[in-house]
Structures are given as structure tokens and as C-alpha cells.
């Protein structure tokens, strides 16, 4: 479901108003402290910032409406631009209303205020836009969705870390990863989800966690229950913190895989009420046992599947909306184990993200498989994820779909 304009308007206004008001109050407090707690400072500074704050509400509202609060870096940019424009406009209006001419000397003075009063305002506004503003906007956007599971189509995504190229490898040799291209490809992946009716929610950026972009490994969704996983490698276990926080924000019930169990989301493939779980190098028997105990009361049947030729189960197979299992014979240990198995011509073609009953998203590295699926009546949305494929990633790895 695409988020309604009414919800966007309300979320944008709430975030903009909160950021502007808190910035106003925080700036007043900072100068109150710097002036040795002189009470007169409060009214003077508040009056100085009055119009700037009004302009900030309007500008932040516009930025939020076009999606600037969806990512932390765009929120910072929006905050800086808003702060500069709002301070110039607000200070200029205050100057004119005070009876001063808006001449060259006055304009020069206004620019000079960015070294003091207005500079503080801009910095505070940018920080709050990227933190409080972004949090309020995202939670407000998701609030009604979380209350109505029928309408919910949210994809959790996570920006690539700065050290993406250092991601772990198990079954492929390391090759050079173009991180700038990876960032561009990630943007294209997110855009493809959004263009096909999914609302994306960013899990907190983890710049030092190389594999964190593969957010699917952190959560397993079973209806309204989010199972927080436990990675098979120690270095990836901190990735779940941000994912769990986002799942809580969506109102999902939280369960966990506990030590000594290990389970990664890439090893879990749901087909109706059947949950296939890969017994791989990352998911152990105890992790499968714990997931089975969580899933059974929710109406799911867990089936363990051996995975020895690839990193995760879903790098060997995924399922079409009609339940057909897609897989490549070189990757699947025993294709006969699965009903309705369809062998695909390319290894990159085993992974699809189901966008709707008639539409799937897949890697552009598998054109022959795309043609095969189109011949079966599906609309195929292709995205380039070549840099993530170098790290044993696929289209499913880059998001967690909440339905």
C-alpha cells in the first residue's frame, strides 16, 4: 500500500513543528547558559528567533513531505538548508519591522549572525531534523499501518556501511567492490520497492558493520511476530539491535533466537504456512528447534533443509506467489525434496522478491530467468545489484518485507 497523502501531511507537519519548536527552545537555553543565566536573555533570544522558527515549520514541512526525513543524511541537508533560509528570512523580517532599511550593510550584518545566534540555530536544527524529526516522521507514517495489518506493506531496508567491501565471504572468492556503485544500486533497489507500492523504513545506519545492508538476516517475520535472529558469526550479532528497534516501532510482537542457537533470516523461506529453514553454516539445529517452537503456535510448519552449496537457503531458492520453488540445480542439494520445483537457467535467477500476486523483483543479472517468469504471466521488475552479488547477496537479502 502506498501511504496516503493525509498521513504524509500529518506526519510531515508533526515532525516539522516538533523540530522547529525544540530548536527554538534549545537555542534559547544555550544562550541563556552562555550569558550566565540572565533571565532577560530568554525573552530577547526568543523574540530574535520567532520568525525564523515560523519559517522553519513551513520549510521543514515541505522537506518532510517530499521524503527528506526518510534518511538521516537527507534530513541533515534539509535541516541545514531550512536553517539558513529561515534565519535569513526571519532576521530580515525582524529588521524591517524594526524600522531598519534592508540595505547592503544590513544584509552583511545578517550573514554575520551565522557566526553567533543564527549559526547555533542552524546547527541545532540540522541535528534535531536528523534525529527527533526523522524518528517522529517515521513513527507517525507507520502508526496507522501498524494498527491495520491488512493494509501493511512495509519493507525494512538499511543503508550500505562504509566498509561494505569488507563483508564476509564463504562460497565465493573476493573481488573488488565498487562502494559508490553499490550505494547507487541500493538507491535503485529502494526506489523499485517504493514504485511498486511498498513503504520503505530505514533501519538505523551501522557504518562499521560491513554486512549490515543485508538486513534480511536480522529478522524473520511470521505474521505480526518478528523473530530477532542470532547470527552464525559473532561479528554480525550487533546488527539485530537496530532491526529490533524498528520492528518494535511497527508494533510487532518480538521473539528471539537465544544462545546456543544460531539462525539467519536468509535461511528462512516461507511458502504459505510452510517455513523452510536452511541448515547451513550460519543456522544450526538449535536455532531451527527454537524457530519451530515459536512458529508452531502461530500456525506455521517448519521444515529443515540441508544447505551445503551456498551461504543461505535463499541464495539457492525462493518461491513465486503461486508456491513454485525457483532454484538452480548446482545450488540446491536435493531439488526432488520440493514440490513444484522449477529449475532456472542462471544462478542469480533463484532469488525473487514477491511484490504482489503478479509482480516479482529480481536481479538484472538473470535475463533468461526473467524471460522464463514473464512467459509464466509474471511482471518482472529487474534491478542491478552486481556489487552485492559479489558479497553473496541477492535481492531478498536487502530488505525485510512486513505484510
Image (spheres, rainbow, N blue to C red):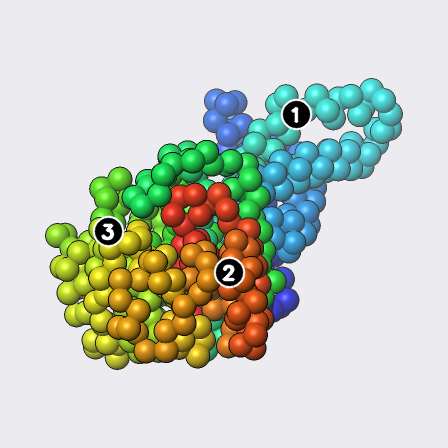
- Could you tell me which residue is drawn at 47 percent across and 68 percent down? 354
Residue 309 spot, x, y in % from top left: 28, 54
Based on the displayed image, in which of its 4 quarters is residue 400 positioned? bottom left
Chain-order first, disc 2 or disc 1: 1
Q: Residue at x 50, y 23 (%)?
A: 34
In which quarter of the view is residue 28 placed? Answer: top right
Residue 174 visible, this angle: yes
- The answer to whether 261 is drawn above or below residue 91 in the figure is below
Alpha carbons under labels 3 and 2: distance apart: 24 Å
Q: Residue at x 19, y 63 (%)?
A: 288
Secondary structure at numbered mark 2:
strand
- Residue at the spot of label 3: 282
- Is 303 left, or right, of 342 in this rendering? left
Q: Position of residue 223 (x, y in %)?
A: 34, 72
Q: Is residue 69 above or below residue 167?
A: below
Task: Judge whether 123 appears above or below 253 on screen.
Answer: above
Q: Which residue is mark 1?
A: 114
Q: Give left or right: position of 256 versus 314.
A: left
Q: Choose between 37 and 170: the one closer to the eye.
A: 170
Where does the N terminus fall, quadrant-wise? bottom right
Pointer 3 with pointer 2, Cβ within 8 A: no
- Name the image quarter holding the C terminus: bottom left
Question: Which of the two marks, 1 or 3, is nearer to us in this view?
Answer: 3
Query: What is the spatial separation of the Cα atoms under label 2 and label 1, in whole angstroms?
Result: 49 Å
Amino acid at each position: 500500500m502506498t501511504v496516503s497523502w493525509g498521513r504524509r501531511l500529518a506526519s510531515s507537519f508533526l515532525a516539522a513543528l516538533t523540530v522547529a519548536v525544540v530548536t527554538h527552545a534549545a537555542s534559547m537555553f544555550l544562550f541563556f547558559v552562555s550569558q550566565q543565566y540572565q533571565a532577560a536573555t530568554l525573552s530577547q533570544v526568543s523574540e530574535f528567533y520567532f520568525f525564523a522558527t515560523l519559517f522553519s515549520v513551513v520549510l521543514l514541512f515541505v522537506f518532510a513531505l517530499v521524503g527528506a526525513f526518510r534518511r538521516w543524511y537527507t534530513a541533515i541537508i534539509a535541516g541545514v538548508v531550512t536553517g539558513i533560509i529561515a534565519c535569513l528570512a526571519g532576521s530580515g523580517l525582524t529588521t524591517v519591522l524594526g524600522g531598519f532599511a534592508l540595505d547592503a550593510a544590513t544584509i552583511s550584518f545578517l550573514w554575520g549572525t551565522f557566526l553567533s545566534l543564527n549559526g547555533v540555530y542552524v546547527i541545532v536544527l540540522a541535528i534535531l531534523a536528523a534525529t527527533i524529526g526523522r524518528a517522529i516522521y517515521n513513527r507517525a507514517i507507520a502508526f496507522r499501518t501498524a494498527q491495520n495489518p491488512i493494509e501493511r506493506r512495509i519493507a525494512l531496508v538499511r543503508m550500505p556501511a562504509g566498509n561494505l567491501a569488507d563483508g564476509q565471504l564463504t562460497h565465493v572468492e573476493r573481488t573488488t567492490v565498487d562502494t559508490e556503485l553499490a550505494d547507487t544500486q541500493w538507491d535503485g533497489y529502494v526506489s523499485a520497492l517504493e514504485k511498486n507500492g511498498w513503504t520503505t523504513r530505514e533501519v538505523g545506519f551501522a557504518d562499521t558493520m560491513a554486512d549490515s545492508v543485508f538486513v534480511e538476516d536480522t529478522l524473520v517475520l511470521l505474521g505480526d511476530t518478528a523473530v530477532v535472529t542470532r547470527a552464525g558469526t559473532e561479528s554480525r550479532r550487533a546488527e539485530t539491535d537496530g532491526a529490533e528497534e524498528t520492528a518494535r516501532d511497527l508494533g510487532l510482537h518480538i521473539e528471539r533466537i537465544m544462545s546456543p542457537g544460531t539462525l539467519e533470516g536468509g535461511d528462512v523461506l516461507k511458502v504459505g504456512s510452510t517455513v523452510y529453514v536452511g541448515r547451513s553454516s550460519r543456522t544450526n539445529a538449535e536455532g531451527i528447534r527454537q524457530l519451530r517452537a515459536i512458529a508452531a503456535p502461530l500456525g506455521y510448519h517448519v521444515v529443515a533443509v540441508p544447505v551445503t552449496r551456498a551461504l543461505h537457503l535463499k541464495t539457492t531458492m525462493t518461491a513465486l506467489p503461486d508456491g513454485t520453488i525457483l532454484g538452480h540445480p548446482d545450488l540446491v542439494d536435493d531439488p526432488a525434496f520440493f514440490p513444484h520445483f522449477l529449475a532456472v537457467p542462471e544462478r542469480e535467477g533463484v532469488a525473487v522478491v514477491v511484490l504482489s500476486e503478479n509482480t516479482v523483483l529480481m536481479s538484472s543479472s538473470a535475463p533468461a530467468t526473467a524471460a522464463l517468469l514473464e512467459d509464466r504471466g509474471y511482471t518482472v521488475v529487474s534491478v542491478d545489484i552486481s556489487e552485492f552479488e559479489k558479497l553473496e547477496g541477492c535481492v531478498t537479502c536487502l530488505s525485510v518485507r512486513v505484510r
